[in-house]
Image (cartoon, rainbow, N blue to C red):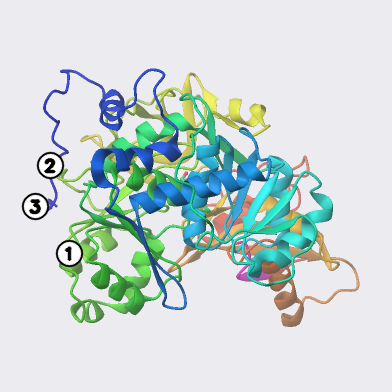
Amino acid sequence: MNDPRTNPSTPKPAGAPAGESVWSAAERELGITQGGPRNIGWLCSDRVCQLGRGSHLALVWEGIQGQTRRYTYDDLRRCTNTIAAFLQGCSVVPGDRVCLFLDKVPELYMGVLGVLKLGAIAQPLFSAFGDESLLTRLQSSEATAILTQRKHLGKVRKILAQTPWLKHVIVVDAGAAPLQQREIGFDLEAAEKVENFDAHPVTAETPSLLHYTSGTTGQPKGAQHVHGSIVAQYATTRQVLDLKPDDVYWCTADPGWVTGTSYGIIGPWSVGVCQVVMEAGFNTEAWYQFLQRHRVTVWYSAPTAIRLLMREGGDVVKRHDLRSLRHLCSVGEPLNAEAVVWSQKTYGLPFLDTYWQTETGCIVITNLPGMPIKPGSMGKPFPGIEATIVDLKTHQPIGKTGVVGLIALKPGWPSMMRTYWRNPEVYAGKFKNGWYICGDRASIDADGYYWFVGRDDDVINTAGHLVGPFEIESALLEHPAVAESAAVATPDPVNMEVVKAFVALKPGFQGDPDLELEIMNFIRKRLSPLAMPQKIEFTQALPKTRSGKIMRRMLRAKEFNEPLGDLSTLEND
Ligand code: WT7
């Protein structure tokens, strides 16, 4: 499948040195020089203004009440200065962690850049997280300040006693609401704008962002990124998302997750495009109206949303004028072949699958514009990324086509995480034989295309969001009726996977529908709607290995009707 409307590749600008690497070219295009400014906050606002695009729109935001706010790059520069200066006034210093616990409001997008301008480390957290999810992530980062909204203040107040290092709770919509100790109001719209703020001088290795991500064991880990990551995010934004300065771009991801920062803040604003943001969540009609109203040209979304759109069919599409669209990309979960074919038929454009992770910071395996698409394949390694498939056990490159192994990447690209925050052991464990192991199974075909098979761990990917079983099981244990539990994925037609919990009850408790509902809500409130089990199966006992580890793999395999695999270590089946 070839798409005639996208360019085969971003043309090399005149004067590009022959043989220049994709990363060096990106540095040159970003104007990054040895010792020169390279603060992400500065590159994404001040620099665009310096290039004469200060009056170009940077952000058009639509709130849930239907209100619209528009910001030019000049506004973006001043607003991010103002946030940086305000934080400085709160005695936040470079290296401090600043948590952003906000809905998709302008203060979130600009707040990230403001934190970076100050040289502090931004920790964006999904605002639907409950108090326990918030607490575990703040206990890890020890953030000294948090930006939030009134509607989330209740959750923040609940954990304040356990976070003594959190000195400032900054409320961006406080208005006249009574605030308590440690709380302070900050109204970006009303604040006197700061014209000049000297962005903190950083090197490529200065920490920028912490994104928390779940693994099979232990609490979520903070993938720590650096200012140098912008080189990779810029290059992939140009070449994969194909963004050019006059595009109108919509990334549907929330900056609580890495897609929403790499390609919802850094990528688009380093290119200088106008991006549009819709605060509200998914709604077919509203989404098509939004695309039409803003004449969106490039759209980056996720398979779950695409499946929901497919379910609504093509008639609703015909009622909207979507002719502005020229390029569509998808990330987060496997993009079914049918979705690619459907999108080609319905929009006249295929969704191009892109693969990456919180840890990689940028797209690493992808379909490039103009490259022939094989529906169902993730495409090929991005130029500048060396990838392979290694053996599941020996971690040696397989070197054969069609054999399933683990996706492995040669470390060293600019946006790779530098460590897991205060967890160097787990970080070190991600490398085998000089390769970074992504933890996903895939195979390569004779043409070099990668085909995703599944995750190599027990992490649940629900609607493109990773949920760790350990976090759910720990929270379940806090419920008075629960003796032990296992959280595994179960198939779902829209979200691909949802959480299912197997729960063994303490004596005296009855596993009935009331208790099931109560436990579901218990998890939803403490963790998040994503982590909430959609199904609970009460059971007498859980399958365990001889060493006492719960065999989630077996429970999961049953859910998916897959072969159960090696059960020789099973204790009580
Ligand atoms: C995991 C990373 C960075 C994007 C948002 C998710 C799965 C991601 C694809 C894809 C199949 C995919 C993998 C990966 N994943 N993209 N195109 N096809 N699976 O970031 O939360 O760190 O999740 O999402 O399992 O390891 P994340």
Would you name the residue on which mark 1 appears?
Answer: 324
Kindly identify the amino acid type of the residue bearing the numbered disc 2.
Pro
> Badges 2 and 1: C-beta atoms under 8 Å apart?
no
Secondary element at image label 2: loop
Secondary element at image label 1: loop
Q: Earlier in the sequence, mark 2 or mark 1?
A: 2
Q: Quadrant of residue 415?
A: top left
Query: Is 499 displayed left or right of 78 in the figure?
Result: right
How far is mark 2 from mark 1, CA to CA? 19 Å
Range of residues picked out in magenta = 531-536
Residue in the image at 84% along x and 54% along y? 161
Q: Position of residue 374 (x, y in %)?
A: 21, 49
Image disc number at residue 139:
none
Image disc number at residue 4:
3
Comparing marks 3 and 1, which lies closer to the viewer? 1
Comparing marks 2 and 1, which lies closer to the viewer? 1
Q: Position of residue 70 (x, y in %)?
A: 36, 63
Q: Earlier in the sequence, mark 3 or mark 1?
A: 3
Q: Quadrant of the C terminus?
A: bottom right
Residue in the image at 38% along x and 37% along y? 43
Q: Position of residue 357 (x, y in %)?
A: 46, 42
Mark 1 sits near ligand 1, with its Cβ under 8 Å away: no
Residue at the far left in the pictured view: 4
How far is mark 3 from mark 2, CA to CA? 9 Å
Q: Nearer the viewer, residue 307 or 180?
A: 180
Residue in the image at 73% along x and 52% along y? 135
Predominant secondary structure, magenta span: loop
Would you name the residue on which mark 2 appears?
Answer: 8
Indicate whether 332 appears above or below 289: above
Q: Position of residue 521 (x, y in %)?
A: 70, 73
Query: Is 323 displayed left or right of 226 in the figure?
Result: left
Q: Within the magenta stretch, is there residue 236?
A: no
